[in-house]
Amino acid sequence: MRKEVKIAIFSIITVAMAIWGYKFLKGFNILSKKLVVYATYQRVDGLRISTPILINGLQVGLVSDIFQNGDDPNNITVELHLDNGTKVPKSAVATIVSDGPMGGSHIDLVFTGNCTGPDCAKDGDYLKGFTKGLLASMVTPDEVRLYMDQLNGGIKDMLDTLSDRLKNSEEINQSVVDVRVTLSNLRNTTDRLDKVMANSAGSVERSIKNIETITSTLKESNQQIKNILANAEAVSNDLKDANVTQLVGETKVTMQKLQTTLASSDKAISDLSALLQSLKSGDGAIPMLLNDKEFASNLETTIKNMDFLLRDLRLHPERYRRVLSKKKMEYEYEPLEDDPAFKNKN
């Protein structure tokens, strides 16, 4: 045998083994005989090639292909490979069942009874296809009915027990009474509140009108407010552009002068306080004038006498010239009005 023939035979065997291994890993044994049937569906959600085919939980085959129906593109045709010796009636239903919320599905072959001879499906036959939803896949109608019956029985027992407890419980009955009283009080409060609101409707309306008036006034004063803000901005810019260092220096000098003035004022106040203290408690004419009433009265009398003397000297100077010349006065002395000497004489 030539070398080229050996290489060709080896290559063919290698390719065949690779194809067989690939199919075998996917679950298909191309060396064993299969029953090939088809099913048509409107939806095949979650169905994949190599999806298992089950009869009452027993795997009897795999999905080998999924493609569109040539006559109706809206229908999907699924090719089913069943193990050799599997007997399936032609009336069997290939139902796509979801495995759960996480995804995945499988096909259940659902049928009743046995098949013999021509009643069994053969290669190329089409089975009826049906797709179950997620909820229908998880529980059957009989299970749902059973669960609902159990749930209804449990709820009924619970409601009966709760009803008995409510009837026989004094605390709950008292709570119901309290709730009724609270609702009654709430109703009375609501009625009073309605009356208050009805009586205050005029005040509320006037308040709203006042608010509208204030709003309109603010609206009319908007331009003035803008002008004030503009002036404030201008002042801020002027302050920003001013020589702040010079202004701080002048302020510092002014503060030093003010401190000096305050120190001088404090010293003057201290001196004045000492003077007043000496006037109040010291000796001399001024303290006596302030503290001795008799001295003040005598001083006042002396001043009045001096005033009368000066007035008399001004009005009758000839009297005093004669006194100096030692001549006798030819007329009687006429005192002035309010002369204290005259009053004392009388």
Image (spheres, helix red, strand yellow):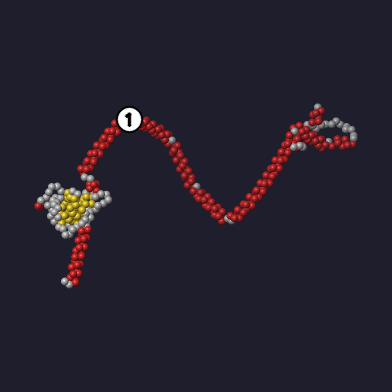
Relative to 298, 244 lies left or right: left
Amino acid type, label 1: Ser
What is the x, y in percent for residue 225?
A: 51, 49
- Tell me the quarter of the picture where residue 288 sits: top right
Residue farthest to the bottom, as pictured: 2
Q: Nearer the viewer, residue 179 or 157?
A: 157
Residue farthest to the top, as pictured: 346
What is the x, y in percent for residue 183?
A: 37, 32
Relative to 91, 311 lies left or right: right
- For the point 20% across and 65% down, which residue is it? 14
Relative to 240, 310 lies left or right: right
Q: Nearer the viewer, residue 256 or 44?
A: 44
Q: Nearer the viewer, residue 134 or 329?
A: 134
Q: Residues within 10 Å of mark 1 (few under 14, many from 20)?
A: few
Q: Nearer the viewer, residue 30 or 160?
A: 30
Look at the numbered disc 1 and give the secondary structure of its residue: loop
- Tell me the quarter of the picture where residue 346 sits: top right
- For the point 26% across and 35% down, which residue is it? 157
Q: Which residue is mark 1?
A: 169
Image quarter where the N terminus lies is bottom left
